[in-house]
Image (cartoon, coloured by chain):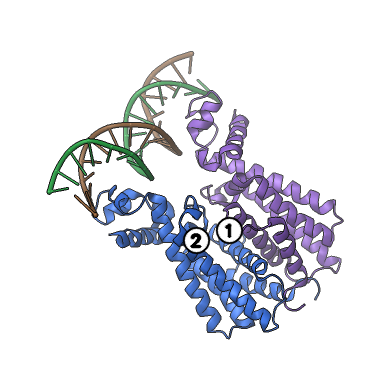
Chain colours: A purple, B blue, C brown, D green
Amino acid sequence: LRQALVQQALRTIQRDGAASVTLRSVGEALGVSRTALYRHFGDKSALLAEVAREGFRTLRLALVEAWDSHGRGRAGFEAQGLAYIQFALTHPSHYRVMFGGMVEAFERYPELSREATGAFQQLVDALVALQEAGLARRDDPFQQACFIWSLVHGIAMLAIDGRLRHPPVDIEALTRYAINRVWTGIDRE
Amino acid sequence: LRQALVQQALRTIQRDGAASVTLRSVGEALGVSRTALYRHFGDKSALLAEVAREGFRTLRLALVEAWDSHGRGRAGFEAQGLAYIQFALTHPSHYRVMFGGMVEAFERYPELSREATGAFQQLVDALVALQEAGLARRDDPFQQACFIWSLVHGIAMLAIDGRLRHPPVDIEALTRYAINRVWTGIDRE
DNA sequence: ACCTGAACACCGTTCAAGT
DNA sequence: ACCTGAACACCGTTCAAGT
Protein backbone atom coordinates (compact mmCIF):
# COMPACT_ATOMS: atom_id res chain seq x y z
CA LEU A 1 0.00 0.00 0.00
CA ARG A 2 2.91 2.32 0.77
CA GLN A 3 4.13 2.02 -2.82
CA ALA A 4 0.57 2.36 -4.12
CA LEU A 5 0.16 5.66 -2.26
CA VAL A 6 3.34 7.04 -3.80
CA GLN A 7 2.33 5.86 -7.27
CA GLN A 8 -1.14 7.37 -6.91
CA ALA A 9 0.29 10.69 -5.67
CA LEU A 10 2.60 10.73 -8.67
CA ARG A 11 -0.29 10.03 -11.04
CA THR A 12 -2.38 12.82 -9.51
CA ILE A 13 0.56 15.22 -9.72
CA GLN A 14 1.13 14.46 -13.38
CA ARG A 15 -2.53 14.83 -14.29
CA ASP A 16 -3.89 17.59 -12.04
CA GLY A 17 -0.83 19.27 -10.53
CA ALA A 18 0.73 19.18 -7.09
CA ALA A 19 -1.98 21.32 -5.51
CA SER A 20 -4.54 18.59 -6.23
CA VAL A 21 -2.69 16.02 -4.18
CA THR A 22 -4.83 15.81 -1.05
CA LEU A 23 -4.93 12.94 1.40
CA ARG A 24 -8.61 12.59 0.58
CA SER A 25 -8.13 12.34 -3.20
CA VAL A 26 -5.21 9.95 -2.94
CA GLY A 27 -7.02 7.74 -0.45
CA GLU A 28 -10.27 7.73 -2.38
CA ALA A 29 -8.52 6.79 -5.64
CA LEU A 30 -7.12 3.75 -3.85
CA GLY A 31 -10.42 2.86 -2.22
CA VAL A 32 -9.06 3.55 1.22
CA SER A 33 -9.82 6.03 3.99
CA ARG A 34 -8.15 9.42 4.02
CA THR A 35 -6.31 8.64 7.23
CA ALA A 36 -4.97 5.23 6.17
CA LEU A 37 -1.86 7.01 4.95
CA TYR A 38 -0.79 7.71 8.53
CA ARG A 39 0.02 4.01 9.00
CA HIS A 40 2.74 4.33 6.34
CA PHE A 41 3.92 7.94 6.48
CA GLY A 42 4.41 10.38 9.31
CA ASP A 43 2.45 13.06 7.50
CA LYS A 44 1.70 14.43 4.05
CA SER A 45 5.16 15.94 3.78
CA ALA A 46 6.72 12.47 4.18
CA LEU A 47 4.64 11.23 1.25
CA LEU A 48 5.79 14.14 -0.91
CA ALA A 49 9.37 13.49 0.21
CA GLU A 50 9.07 10.00 -1.23
CA VAL A 51 7.67 11.43 -4.46
CA ALA A 52 10.56 13.90 -4.65
CA ARG A 53 13.08 11.13 -3.98
CA GLU A 54 11.68 9.14 -6.88
CA GLY A 55 12.04 12.27 -9.02
CA PHE A 56 15.70 12.77 -8.19
CA ARG A 57 16.37 9.14 -9.00
CA THR A 58 14.74 9.49 -12.42
CA LEU A 59 16.57 12.76 -13.03
CA ARG A 60 19.95 11.25 -12.16
CA LEU A 61 19.39 8.33 -14.51
CA ALA A 62 18.42 10.75 -17.30
CA LEU A 63 21.57 12.81 -16.73
CA VAL A 64 23.84 9.76 -16.68
CA GLU A 65 22.22 8.43 -19.85
CA ALA A 66 22.70 11.75 -21.68
CA TRP A 67 26.30 12.13 -20.53
CA ASP A 68 27.33 8.55 -21.31
CA SER A 69 25.64 8.29 -24.68
CA HIS A 70 27.16 11.51 -26.03
CA GLY A 71 30.83 10.85 -25.47
CA ARG A 72 31.43 12.45 -22.06
CA GLY A 73 32.85 15.57 -23.69
CA ARG A 74 31.39 18.86 -24.80
CA ALA A 75 28.52 17.09 -26.59
CA GLY A 76 27.79 15.09 -23.46
CA PHE A 77 27.81 18.24 -21.35
CA GLU A 78 25.27 19.89 -23.64
CA ALA A 79 23.15 16.74 -23.79
CA GLN A 80 23.11 16.61 -20.01
CA GLY A 81 21.85 20.17 -19.77
CA LEU A 82 19.15 19.52 -22.35
CA ALA A 83 18.13 16.32 -20.57
CA TYR A 84 17.76 18.27 -17.33
CA ILE A 85 15.46 20.84 -18.91
CA GLN A 86 13.53 18.16 -20.73
CA PHE A 87 12.86 16.33 -17.48
CA ALA A 88 11.59 19.53 -15.87
CA LEU A 89 9.35 20.40 -18.82
CA THR A 90 7.99 16.87 -19.13
CA HIS A 91 7.21 16.58 -15.41
CA PRO A 92 6.65 20.18 -14.29
CA SER A 93 4.58 19.37 -11.20
CA HIS A 94 6.91 16.61 -10.17
CA TYR A 95 9.81 19.02 -10.55
CA ARG A 96 7.98 21.50 -8.34
CA VAL A 97 7.61 18.92 -5.59
CA MET A 98 11.36 18.35 -5.82
CA PHE A 99 12.30 22.04 -5.72
CA GLY A 100 9.28 24.17 -4.87
CA GLY A 101 9.61 24.00 -1.11
CA MET A 102 6.59 21.69 -0.88
CA VAL A 103 8.46 19.22 1.29
CA GLU A 104 8.74 20.70 4.78
CA ALA A 105 12.19 20.27 6.31
CA PHE A 106 13.88 18.71 3.31
CA GLU A 107 16.92 17.78 5.39
CA ARG A 108 14.85 15.61 7.72
CA TYR A 109 14.51 12.94 5.03
CA PRO A 110 17.94 11.30 4.69
CA GLU A 111 16.93 9.10 1.74
CA LEU A 112 15.65 12.14 -0.14
CA SER A 113 18.80 14.12 0.65
CA ARG A 114 20.94 11.22 -0.50
CA GLU A 115 19.10 10.90 -3.81
CA ALA A 116 19.25 14.66 -4.40
CA THR A 117 22.96 14.67 -3.65
CA GLY A 118 23.38 11.75 -6.04
CA ALA A 119 21.89 13.68 -8.93
CA PHE A 120 24.06 16.68 -8.11
CA GLN A 121 27.11 14.44 -7.85
CA GLN A 122 26.58 13.27 -11.42
CA LEU A 123 27.12 16.87 -12.53
CA VAL A 124 30.22 17.21 -10.34
CA ASP A 125 31.64 13.97 -11.77
CA ALA A 126 31.06 15.18 -15.30
CA LEU A 127 32.83 18.47 -14.59
CA VAL A 128 35.79 16.67 -13.01
CA ALA A 129 36.03 14.50 -16.12
CA LEU A 130 35.94 17.57 -18.34
CA GLN A 131 38.66 19.21 -16.26
CA GLU A 132 40.85 16.13 -16.43
CA ALA A 133 40.37 16.00 -20.19
CA GLY A 134 41.55 19.62 -20.41
CA LEU A 135 38.14 20.75 -21.62
CA ALA A 136 37.15 22.88 -18.63
CA ARG A 137 38.82 25.34 -16.27
CA ARG A 138 40.26 23.69 -13.19
CA ASP A 139 38.08 25.62 -10.74
CA ASP A 140 36.63 24.02 -7.63
CA PRO A 141 34.29 21.42 -9.20
CA PHE A 142 31.72 21.86 -6.46
CA GLN A 143 31.41 25.60 -7.04
CA GLN A 144 31.44 25.03 -10.77
CA ALA A 145 28.60 22.53 -10.36
CA CYS A 146 26.60 24.95 -8.20
CA PHE A 147 26.93 27.51 -10.97
CA ILE A 148 25.77 25.18 -13.74
CA TRP A 149 22.98 23.72 -11.61
CA SER A 150 21.71 27.20 -10.78
CA LEU A 151 21.59 28.03 -14.46
CA VAL A 152 19.56 25.04 -15.58
CA HIS A 153 17.39 25.22 -12.46
CA GLY A 154 16.67 28.87 -13.23
CA ILE A 155 15.68 28.10 -16.81
CA ALA A 156 13.52 25.21 -15.64
CA MET A 157 11.72 27.20 -12.95
CA LEU A 158 11.07 30.25 -15.13
CA ALA A 159 9.78 27.98 -17.87
CA ILE A 160 7.55 25.97 -15.53
CA ASP A 161 6.16 29.10 -13.90
CA GLY A 162 5.22 30.40 -17.34
CA ARG A 163 7.58 33.34 -17.04
CA LEU A 164 9.04 32.67 -20.48
CA ARG A 165 5.76 32.86 -22.36
CA HIS A 166 5.28 36.60 -22.83
CA PRO A 167 6.75 36.77 -25.37
CA PRO A 168 7.07 33.02 -25.97
CA VAL A 169 10.61 31.71 -25.65
CA ASP A 170 11.99 28.59 -27.33
CA ILE A 171 13.22 26.87 -24.17
CA GLU A 172 15.43 24.39 -25.98
CA ALA A 173 17.07 27.15 -28.02
CA LEU A 174 17.59 29.18 -24.84
CA THR A 175 19.15 26.16 -23.15
CA ARG A 176 21.51 25.56 -26.06
CA TYR A 177 22.45 29.23 -26.10
CA ALA A 178 23.03 29.28 -22.33
CA ILE A 179 25.21 26.17 -22.42
CA ASN A 180 27.23 27.57 -25.30
CA ARG A 181 27.70 30.87 -23.48
CA VAL A 182 28.77 29.05 -20.35
CA TRP A 183 31.25 27.15 -22.44
CA THR A 184 32.79 29.98 -24.40
CA GLY A 185 31.90 33.10 -22.42
CA ILE A 186 30.10 36.21 -23.49
CA ASP A 187 32.91 38.74 -23.21
CA ARG A 188 33.77 39.20 -26.87
CA GLU A 189 32.89 37.88 -30.28
CA LEU B 1 -7.58 50.43 3.54
CA ARG B 2 -6.51 48.88 0.26
CA GLN B 3 -2.95 50.10 0.83
CA ALA B 4 -3.13 49.03 4.47
CA LEU B 5 -4.02 45.48 3.43
CA VAL B 6 -1.03 45.29 1.10
CA GLN B 7 1.29 46.73 3.75
CA GLN B 8 0.02 44.29 6.38
CA ALA B 9 0.38 41.34 3.99
CA LEU B 10 3.95 42.42 3.31
CA ARG B 11 4.70 42.71 7.02
CA THR B 12 3.30 39.24 7.70
CA ILE B 13 5.30 37.81 4.80
CA GLN B 14 8.54 39.30 6.08
CA ARG B 15 7.98 38.10 9.63
CA ASP B 16 6.21 34.74 9.34
CA GLY B 17 6.55 33.72 5.70
CA ALA B 18 4.13 33.66 2.80
CA ALA B 19 2.25 30.62 4.12
CA SER B 20 1.11 32.64 7.13
CA VAL B 21 -0.66 35.22 5.03
CA THR B 22 -4.31 34.31 5.53
CA LEU B 23 -7.28 36.56 5.02
CA ARG B 24 -8.11 36.04 8.68
CA SER B 25 -4.68 37.05 9.99
CA VAL B 26 -4.38 40.07 7.72
CA GLY B 27 -7.87 41.23 8.57
CA GLU B 28 -7.48 40.69 12.28
CA ALA B 29 -4.20 42.60 12.39
CA LEU B 30 -6.02 45.56 10.87
CA GLY B 31 -9.02 45.24 13.16
CA VAL B 32 -11.31 44.37 10.31
CA SER B 33 -13.36 41.34 9.33
CA ARG B 34 -11.80 38.58 7.27
CA THR B 35 -14.12 39.27 4.35
CA ALA B 36 -13.57 43.03 4.23
CA LEU B 37 -10.79 42.40 1.75
CA TYR B 38 -13.31 41.43 -0.91
CA ARG B 39 -14.40 45.07 -1.20
CA HIS B 40 -10.91 45.96 -2.47
CA PHE B 41 -9.60 42.84 -4.17
CA GLY B 42 -11.21 40.18 -6.29
CA ASP B 43 -9.67 37.42 -4.20
CA LYS B 44 -6.57 36.51 -2.22
CA SER B 45 -4.55 36.05 -5.41
CA ALA B 46 -5.21 39.68 -6.35
CA LEU B 47 -3.80 40.81 -3.01
CA LEU B 48 -0.67 38.73 -3.55
CA ALA B 49 -0.40 40.12 -7.08
CA GLU B 50 -0.20 43.58 -5.57
CA VAL B 51 2.47 42.40 -3.14
CA ALA B 52 4.44 40.88 -6.02
CA ARG B 53 4.10 44.07 -8.06
CA GLU B 54 5.55 46.08 -5.19
CA GLY B 55 8.44 43.58 -5.09
CA PHE B 56 9.27 43.94 -8.77
CA ARG B 57 9.27 47.70 -8.38
CA THR B 58 11.73 47.52 -5.48
CA LEU B 59 13.86 45.02 -7.37
CA ARG B 60 14.01 47.20 -10.48
CA LEU B 61 15.07 50.23 -8.45
CA ALA B 62 17.80 48.16 -6.76
CA LEU B 63 19.08 46.95 -10.14
CA VAL B 64 19.10 50.44 -11.64
CA GLU B 65 20.90 51.83 -8.58
CA ALA B 66 23.59 49.13 -8.74
CA TRP B 67 24.09 49.53 -12.48
CA ASP B 68 24.22 53.34 -12.43
CA SER B 69 26.47 53.69 -9.40
CA HIS B 70 29.11 51.28 -10.69
CA GLY B 71 29.88 52.81 -14.07
CA ARG B 72 27.53 50.86 -16.37
CA GLY B 73 30.38 48.58 -17.44
CA ARG B 74 31.65 45.25 -16.23
CA ALA B 75 31.64 46.45 -12.59
CA GLY B 76 28.06 47.62 -13.00
CA PHE B 77 27.08 44.29 -14.49
CA GLU B 78 28.52 42.43 -11.52
CA ALA B 79 26.99 44.86 -9.04
CA GLN B 80 23.61 44.33 -10.68
CA GLY B 81 23.87 40.58 -10.28
CA LEU B 82 24.89 40.90 -6.65
CA ALA B 83 22.06 43.36 -6.00
CA TYR B 84 19.60 40.86 -7.45
CA ILE B 85 20.78 38.07 -5.16
CA GLN B 86 20.91 40.41 -2.19
CA PHE B 87 17.28 41.40 -2.74
CA ALA B 88 16.24 37.75 -2.89
CA LEU B 89 18.19 36.81 0.25
CA THR B 90 16.97 39.84 2.19
CA HIS B 91 13.31 39.26 1.28
CA PRO B 92 13.07 35.51 0.65
CA SER B 93 9.32 35.19 1.23
CA HIS B 94 8.59 38.28 -0.81
CA TYR B 95 10.72 36.83 -3.61
CA ARG B 96 8.72 33.61 -3.40
CA VAL B 97 5.48 35.49 -3.87
CA MET B 98 6.99 37.08 -6.98
CA PHE B 99 8.28 33.83 -8.47
CA GLY B 100 6.93 30.85 -6.55
CA GLY B 101 3.71 30.45 -8.47
CA MET B 102 1.68 31.79 -5.54
CA VAL B 103 -0.17 34.26 -7.73
CA GLU B 104 -2.69 32.33 -9.78
CA ALA B 105 -2.81 33.41 -13.43
CA PHE B 106 0.08 35.85 -13.32
CA GLU B 107 -0.80 37.19 -16.77
CA ARG B 108 -4.24 38.29 -15.62
CA TYR B 109 -2.75 41.19 -13.67
CA PRO B 110 -1.55 43.72 -16.24
CA GLU B 111 0.06 46.03 -13.66
CA LEU B 112 2.02 43.13 -12.21
CA SER B 113 3.10 41.97 -15.65
CA ARG B 114 4.16 45.50 -16.53
CA GLU B 115 6.26 45.87 -13.40
CA ALA B 116 7.86 42.45 -13.89
CA THR B 117 8.66 43.33 -17.50
CA GLY B 118 10.12 46.62 -16.30
CA ALA B 119 12.62 44.87 -14.03
CA PHE B 120 13.55 42.48 -16.82
CA GLN B 121 13.90 45.38 -19.24
CA GLN B 122 16.52 46.97 -16.98
CA LEU B 123 18.70 43.90 -17.58
CA VAL B 124 18.05 44.04 -21.33
CA ASP B 125 18.99 47.72 -21.39
CA ALA B 126 22.22 47.03 -19.52
CA LEU B 127 23.16 44.28 -21.95
CA VAL B 128 22.44 46.51 -24.95
CA ALA B 129 24.68 49.17 -23.40
CA LEU B 130 27.43 46.60 -22.86
CA GLN B 131 27.10 45.42 -26.46
CA GLU B 132 27.28 48.97 -27.80
CA ALA B 133 30.36 49.60 -25.67
CA GLY B 134 31.99 46.53 -27.23
CA LEU B 135 32.00 44.74 -23.89
CA ALA B 136 29.58 41.93 -24.72
CA ARG B 137 28.81 39.66 -27.64
CA ARG B 138 26.22 41.07 -30.01
CA ASP B 139 23.74 38.25 -29.50
CA ASP B 140 20.01 38.83 -29.33
CA PRO B 141 19.80 40.95 -26.16
CA PHE B 142 16.49 39.37 -25.17
CA GLN B 143 17.89 35.84 -25.29
CA GLN B 144 21.04 37.03 -23.55
CA ALA B 145 18.89 38.56 -20.82
CA CYS B 146 16.85 35.35 -20.42
CA PHE B 147 20.11 33.50 -19.94
CA ILE B 148 21.45 35.87 -17.26
CA TRP B 149 18.09 36.14 -15.51
CA SER B 150 17.81 32.35 -15.37
CA LEU B 151 21.22 32.14 -13.77
CA VAL B 152 20.60 34.63 -10.96
CA HIS B 153 17.07 33.35 -10.48
CA GLY B 154 18.43 29.83 -10.12
CA ILE B 155 20.98 30.89 -7.53
CA ALA B 156 18.33 32.86 -5.66
CA MET B 157 15.80 30.02 -5.61
CA LEU B 158 18.28 27.32 -4.59
CA ALA B 159 19.57 29.59 -1.83
CA ILE B 160 16.09 30.50 -0.59
CA ASP B 161 14.96 26.87 -0.62
CA GLY B 162 17.97 25.96 1.51
CA ARG B 163 19.44 23.76 -1.20
CA LEU B 164 22.85 25.38 -0.83
CA ARG B 165 23.28 24.64 2.86
CA HIS B 166 24.50 21.03 2.84
CA PRO B 167 27.36 21.71 2.66
CA PRO B 168 27.00 25.46 3.27
CA VAL B 169 27.74 27.62 0.24
CA ASP B 170 28.92 31.23 0.33
CA ILE B 171 26.18 32.66 -1.88
CA GLU B 172 27.96 35.92 -2.61
CA ALA B 173 31.13 34.09 -3.61
CA LEU B 174 29.10 31.77 -5.83
CA THR B 175 27.40 34.75 -7.44
CA ARG B 176 30.73 36.46 -8.11
CA TYR B 177 32.13 33.23 -9.55
CA ALA B 178 29.07 32.72 -11.75
CA ILE B 179 29.16 36.25 -13.09
CA ASN B 180 32.86 35.96 -13.81
CA ARG B 181 32.34 32.64 -15.60
CA VAL B 182 29.51 34.13 -17.63
CA TRP B 183 31.79 36.96 -18.56
CA THR B 184 34.88 35.02 -19.57
CA GLY B 185 33.64 31.50 -20.21
CA ILE B 186 34.70 28.22 -18.71
CA ASP B 187 36.14 26.50 -21.77
CA ARG B 188 39.88 26.92 -21.02
CA GLU B 189 42.17 28.44 -18.49
C1' DA C 1 -20.01 52.45 -0.82
C1' DC C 2 -18.30 49.59 2.71
C1' DC C 3 -18.37 46.13 6.20
C1' DT C 4 -20.20 42.06 9.03
C1' DG C 5 -21.59 37.26 10.59
C1' DA C 6 -23.11 33.06 9.47
C1' DA C 7 -22.67 29.42 6.33
C1' DC C 8 -20.37 26.39 2.86
C1' DA C 9 -17.01 23.43 0.94
C1' DC C 10 -12.64 22.36 1.44
C1' DC C 11 -7.89 21.10 4.11
C1' DG C 12 -4.37 18.14 7.35
C1' DT C 13 -4.32 15.83 11.57
C1' DT C 14 -5.70 13.34 15.98
C1' DC C 15 -7.77 9.70 18.37
C1' DA C 16 -10.77 6.31 20.26
C1' DA C 17 -12.70 2.38 18.35
C1' DG C 18 -12.92 -1.58 15.45
C1' DT C 19 -10.78 -6.14 12.97
C1' DA D 1 -0.54 -4.57 12.47
C1' DC D 2 -3.72 -2.02 9.88
C1' DC D 3 -7.75 0.67 8.95
C1' DT D 4 -12.08 3.54 9.96
C1' DG D 5 -15.32 7.43 11.31
C1' DA D 6 -16.07 11.20 13.85
C1' DA D 7 -14.14 15.30 15.53
C1' DC D 8 -11.02 19.40 15.60
C1' DA D 9 -8.83 23.43 14.02
C1' DC D 10 -7.81 25.54 10.14
C1' DC D 11 -8.55 27.54 5.00
C1' DG D 12 -10.86 30.80 0.94
C1' DT D 13 -15.16 32.28 -0.59
C1' DT D 14 -20.25 33.49 -0.93
C1' DC D 15 -24.17 35.98 0.41
C1' DA D 16 -27.95 38.07 2.78
C1' DA D 17 -28.08 41.60 5.98
C1' DG D 18 -26.76 45.76 8.19
C1' DT D 19 -24.94 51.09 8.21
Residue found 55% across the figure and 27% down from its top: A29
Q: How many marks?
A: 2
Tell me if label 2 and label 1 are in contact, CB under 8 Å.
Answer: yes
Q: Which secondary structure lies at badge 2?
A: helix
Query: Compared to A13, does B34 lie above or below?
Result: below
Query: Compared to B66, does B31 lie above or below?
Result: above
Q: Which residue is tagged 1?
A: A166
Q: Amino acid at mark 1?
A: His
The disc label shown at residue B113, or none = 2
Locate residue B20, reporting x and y percent.
39, 52
Q: Amino acid at mark 2?
A: Ser
Local crowd at mark 2 within 10 Å, few (<14), some, or many (≥20)?
some
Q: Quadrant of residue B52?
A: bottom left
Q: Which image quarter holds the N terminus of chain B?
A: bottom left
Residue found 56% across the figure and 84% down from its top: B70
Locate residue A139, reporting x and y percent.
74, 71
The disc label shown at residue A35, or none = none
Identify which residue, B44 or A2, lies in the foreground. Answer: B44
Q: Quadrant of residue B54?
A: bottom left
Locate residue B110, reporting x and y percent.
46, 59
Describe residue B45's horizontal placement relative to residue B154 as left or right. left
Measured in 3D between alpha carbons, the distance from the residue under mark 2 to the one under mark 1, in whole angstroms, is: 9 Å
Residue found 50% across the figure and 79% down from its top: B65
Specify the subunit that label 2 lies on. Answer: B
Identify which residue, A15 or A11, lies in the foreground. Answer: A15
Local crowd at mark 1 within 10 Å, few (<14), some, or many (≥20)?
few
Q: Quadrant of residue A155?
A: bottom right
Specify the subunit that label 1 lies on. Answer: A
Residue found 69% across the figure and 72% down from its top: B182
Describe residue B150's horizontal placement relative to residue B54 as left or right. right
